[in-house]
Amino acid sequence: MNDMSDDPQALDQIAAQRAQTHQTRRATVPAMEERLYTPHPVLDHGFVRVVDYMGDDSAIVQAARVSYGAGTKKARNDEGLIRYLMRHWHSTPFEMCELKLHVKLPVFVARQWIRHRTANVNEYSARYSILDREFYIPDPAHLAAQSTANNQGRGEVLHGDEAARVLEILKADSTRAYDNYEAMLSQDGQQGLARELARMNLPANIYTQWYWKVDLHNLFHFLRLRADAHAQYEIRAYADAICEMVRDWVPAAYAAFEDYRLNSVQISGKGLNALRRMLAGEEMDAEKAGMSAGEWREFEGILEK
Ligand SMILES: Cc1cc2nc3c(=O)[nH]c(=O)nc-3n(C[C@H](O)[C@H](O)[C@H](O)COP(=O)(O)OP(=O)(O)OC[C@H]3O[C@@H](n4cnc5c(N)ncnc54)[C@H](O)[C@@H]3O)c2cc1C
């Protein structure tokens, strides 16, 4: 199963949800109405889908104008005000918008995701229900060797035979673990182990699901860290999908986020000083800039981008 598309019960449920309409005086966003409930496939069996949302670009502006007063209306248009808020880290107006997602993701991705403490989460209970036989098996294009430059990353993609060997191990281990899970749960002529205990032999590439609700400010923080090149590919795939949703939902806020956060860089005081000296024509290096070799490498990397 990939995006619920071969689960008739799930498809019926989605169709029923999408067939219902409600009258409201609240702001709605046509592109989000279109997205509501439909799963967006991510990885081999995962998805992310919008279950609900609150607010739009105007909700941010409306909240900001409470603090700045009506005077700002003349001075800035809505888009300009949103850019100003983002630029100056005036973050609370962004908290006026909320997004509720249903996510299906491998457990090892969930472990990274759950570190973002500012969301509300409700996860599928493997004490109450039996987990599906669904494991994340990476596409060969994403099977890479340990990076030699970065202890926390991957390097070159594995070659043919090596990729096949690794895939075989991943598949065999997942199958064996799930077979044993079922064998332990089985009450066929035996007592059978409780679900809350039998799950402990399942590997971290099994899929789980949760509802995840977060405000836009904290969602931007999550996306800044997880849609970044330093984030692991698997969580980044989800973050990239959510970026598309947020772009549809609050286009002005997303554009400001993209400009001031996602595509921006942070330069230290030493970096700024070095940059000014370089602009004045001075030849600079790590020592002159007062930086470590690693810091200088990163600084040069920023300038080369
Ligand atoms: C590339 C990358 C590599 C990572 N590597 C590791 C690793 O090796 N090991 C590891 O353990 N983690 C690792 N992490 C996780 C990282 O350290 C953070 O825990 C995670 O990104 C969540 O960030 P956050 O705390 O800012 O987010 P959130 O929990 O969403 O918090 C948002 C903000 O709210 C505030 N906040 C929330 N809760 C508190 C609190 N209790 N006290 C004070 N302030 C709070 C902080 O300002 C925080 O920045 C990694 C993350 C990334 C992106």
Image: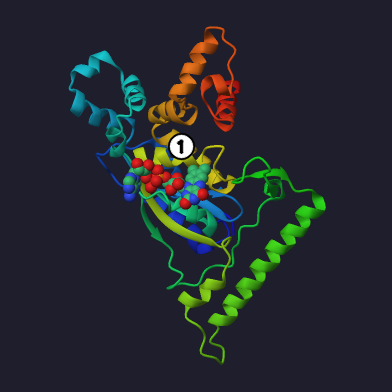
Residue at image point 51% right, 12% down:
277
Image position of 166 (left or right of 6): right
Type of amino acid under label 1: Arg
Q: Nearer the viewer, residue 162 or 101?
A: 162
**In the figure, is residue 70 to the left or right of 50?**
left
Q: Which quadrant of the rendered structure holds the N terminus?
A: bottom right
226 over 193 or under it: above or below: above
Q: In the rendered image, is residue 172 in sight?
A: yes
User: According to the image, label 1 marks what residue?
Assistant: 224
- Image position of 113 with respect to 181: above or below: above
Residue 53 appears in the picture as rendered = no
Color encoding of the figure: rainbow
Note whether 70 is above or below 108 in the view shown. Answer: above
Q: Position of residue 93 (x, y in %)?
A: 28, 33
**What is the x, y in percent for residue 300?**
59, 24
Which residue is drawn at the image coordinates 76% and 53% (left, top)?
Answer: 163
The residue lying at 52 percent from left, 53 percent from top is 109
In this view, 223 is above or below 211: above
Residue found farthest to the top:
280
Q: Secondary structure at mark 1?
A: helix
* Quadrant containing the C terminus in the rendered view: top right
Q: Position of residue 22 (x, y in %)?
A: 30, 47
Q: Residue 244, how many percent across, how many down?
A: 49, 37
Is 240 left, or right, of 159 in this rendering? left
